[in-house]
Amino acid sequence: MREIAEIMYQVAKIIPRLPTPLPHVATIVRGIRIQQGLSSQSRNNSYIQAALLCFYLECKDIDNAMHLFSSITNKSNYMYTVMFKGLITNNAAEKVLNLFDEMKIEPDQFNLSTLFNACAVLNNNRAMKTGKKLLDEMPENYRNNNITSTSAIDMLMKFGDVESAERIFQSIKAKDIITYGAMVKGYVGNEMFEKALDLFEQIHLSLTN
């Protein structure tokens, strides 16, 4: 079963490089009937399910991805991350929040990071409410995760909530270049150019100490 899943992952990686319009590619490749040919045991294999989700989303076939996802009984955090990322890539960030509203398991750090990204992309009232609620309820042990914190910073900067972004930035114990980059970009996006320059000058000193 893992061999089938590996094939789906590899095909999904190749699809974005093909010159043919992706919706047509999805139809052509779907003609292989990989999914239809799977046994019931294989269809319920989480590794294969995740591979198929990646496949459909790379094909920009959101409808089939959503249909498959809704049919999965035991959805894992990884599957949610796959769906969230794929929907954002396919300009369907609103659907990310719809899926989150139906989520029956606690979001992990990767779910949270991707949800923050979706909220940043949408940047509307619903996104602001959802993003800040997620941030308020985020487990303490996730707050020292640079990926999650950086996504939160980017989201808050997009919302124009610079003070909250600064608080998170200051709370990060081991800042990396990506974290600094998110802050500098956020300052520039909010037309706070002096702060952006000051922080940029601090980057070299902070990262070499």
Image (spheres, helix red, strand yellow):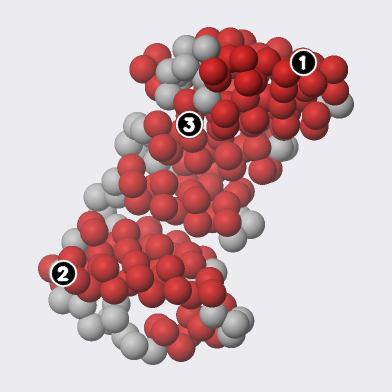
Residue at image position (43%, 18%) is: 144
**What residue is shown with label 1?**
198
Element marked by disc 3: helix
Relative side of 98 to 123, left or right = left
Disc 3 and disc 1 in contact, CB within 8 angstroms: no
Residue at image position (18%, 66%) is: 2
How far apart are the two marked residues, 2 and 1, measured between alpha carbons? 54 Å
Say which of marks 2 and 1 sits in front: 1
Q: Earlier in the sequence, mark 3 or mark 1?
A: 3
**What residue is shown with label 2?**
1
Count neighbours of disc 3 (C-alpha within 10 A) and say few if under 14, some if 14 to 19, many if 20 or more: some
The N terminus sits in image quarter: bottom left
Residue 150 x/y as whole percent: 55, 28
Q: Mark 2 belongs to which amino acid?
A: Met
Q: Earlier in the sequence, mark 3 or mark 2?
A: 2
- In the image, residue 193 above or below residue 170: below
Say which of marks 3 and 1 sits in front: 1
Count neighbours of disc 1 (C-alpha within 10 A) and say few if under 14, some if 14 to 19, many if 20 or more: few
**What residue is shown with label 3?**
147
- In the image, residue 89 above or below residue 98: below
- In the image, residue 31 above or below residue 201: below
Which of the pair 119/185 is nearer the observer? Answer: 185
Splitting the image into 4 quarters, where does residue 141 fall? top left
Residue 27 x/y as whole percent: 48, 85
Q: Mark 3 belongs to which amino acid?
A: Ile
Which of the pair 173/56 is nearer the observer? Answer: 173
